[in-house]
Amino acid sequence: MELATIGFLSAIVFGLIAGDAVISANTMAVGIGLPPTVQQSGLTRQSAEEIFITELSRIAAIPSGVPVPVPRVSSRRTVIGALAEPLKLTDVTAALQDLFGLEPIRVSATMIDRGNELVLETIVAQEGRPLQRLSFTRTDKDAVALIRHAAVTTFAEIAPFRVTLAQLRDVLQDPSIEVGPVRAAAERLLNRDWGANTDVERSALHSLVSVLALLHGDVPAARDQIARADAFQGALPTARTFYALNGSFVAVIEGDLRLAERELNRAAQVPMQQLIPTFPAYIEIQRGLIHWADGKPDEADAAFERALGYDARNRVALVYRHWIARLRQGAPLDVSDRPPVVTSVSAQIPGLMVSAFLLDPRDHSVMRAR
C-alpha cells in the first residue's frame, strides 16, 4: 500500500476517533444494567436507558441561560462511534478525551433484584468532581418507577439549577405540592462540594432558593439568598437583572421603598426584551407596586396599564388594576377577588417574584399569583 494511502486512511481513522470523543464530550451518557428477572419482564437495557432519558427531557428543555448537558443513551451509538466500534477504538476515544480535557458526564447504573425489593445503584462521573454513588430502592419492585425517580435525583447532582427550576415551576402551578421538601433539596445542593468554575449555576440556584423561601413565608431568608446570588463574580449579567428585580420586590415587602427603587432602576438598565419579550411588563408592574406602597394608587395604575401595553394578557397586571378599580369604587378589597384571565408568562419567568406572587402594598402581604 502506498504511503499516501496509508496516511489518508490514518487521517480518516483519527478523525473518527476524535469526532466521537468530541461528540461524547458534549453529552451525558447514561448506561443501565438490568438483572435477568427484570429483563424477563420485557424491560431491555436500551428501553431502561430511554425511560431514564425521557424523564429528563422536560427538565433539559426548559429555556435558561445556565447550560445543561444533553442526555444520550449509551447503548445507542453515535454515527461516528458506530463506524469506529468495529475497529476496537473505544479505549482510544477515552484516552483522547483525557488528553484534550474532553470529560463527558457519565451515569452508570446497575439494577439489583434483592428478592423483596429492587435497588438501583448509580455512579455519576463528571469533570472536576469525585465519583458520586447514589442508591434508590422500591419495595413494590416497580422497575420503571424506580428508574424515573432515580433519573431526576441523579440529574439534580449534574444540573442542580435546571432540576430545581423545573420543581419550582411545578410548585407554582400545583398548590398541592409541598414547598418544604423542594426547598430542603435545593439547599442541600447549595451546600455540596461544587468545585471550580461553577459561579453561574451556584448563583442562579441561590436565586431560585430565594423564591422557595418566600413561598415558605421566610422573607429574611429570601433577602439573604438574593444577596448571595448577586455576590458571585461570575454570575450572568442577565441573571443580575432577575436578582435586582427580586431584590426590589422583597424591599417593598419590608417597607424599604428607596432600596426598592434603586434595585428596580438597576434591573431596568439591562435590555431583556430580546430574551424575554414580556419582561418589560414586569418592570412596570414592579414600578406600580412601589408607587402603590408609597400611597400613589393613580401612578401605580398607570404603570400597570403600561405593563399591559407590553403584555396585554398579563394576569398580574390585570389583577392589580382590578384591585385598584375596586378601591376607587369604595368597595372593600378582597385579595381573593381576581379577574378570570390567563397570563402569557414566559417559561423563564418562574424565578421572578413579581410574576410568581401578588403583593398587597397596603399591608405588605404576599400570596401566589396563580
Image (cartoon, helix red, strand yellow):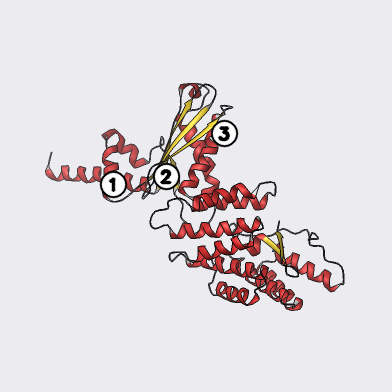
Mark 2 surroundings: few (<14), some (14-19) or many (≥20) residues within 10 A: many
Q: Residue at x 46, y 32 (%)?
A: 46
Residue at the spot of label 1: 98
Mark 3 surroundings: few (<14), some (14-19) or many (≥20) residues within 10 A: some
Mark pair 1, 3: CA separation: 35 Å
Name of the residue lying farthest toward the right: 330
* Amino acid of disc 2: Met
Q: Secondary structure at mark 1?
A: helix
> Who is closer to the viewer here, 337 or 78?
337
Q: Quadrant of the C terminus?
A: bottom right
> Who is closer to the viewer here, 98 or 154?
154
Question: Residue 215 location in percent, x, y?
Answer: 65, 56
> Who is closer to the viewer here, 22 or 38?
38
- Image marks 2 and 1: residues in contact by CB distance under 8 Å: no
* Amino acid of disc 1: Asp
Q: Left or right: where does residue 148 sit relative to residue 130?
A: right
Q: Residue at x 57, y 56 (%)?
A: 209
Q: Secondary structure at mark 3?
A: helix
Residue at the spot of label 3: 145
Q: Nearer the viewer, mark 2 or mark 3?
A: 3
Mark pair 2, 1: CA separation: 16 Å
Q: Left or right: where does residue 25 sit relative to residue 225?
A: left
Mark 1 surroundings: few (<14), some (14-19) or many (≥20) residues within 10 A: few
Q: Residue at x 54, y 72 (%)?
A: 271
Residue at the spot of label 2: 28
Q: Residue at x 34, y 40 (%)?
A: 81
- Image marks 1 and 3: residues in contact by CB distance under 8 Å: no
Question: Residue 67 location in percent, x, y?
Answer: 46, 55
**Residue 120 shows in the view:** yes
Which comes before the other along the chain, label 2 or label 3? Answer: 2
Check the image and report above or below for 167 versus 273: above
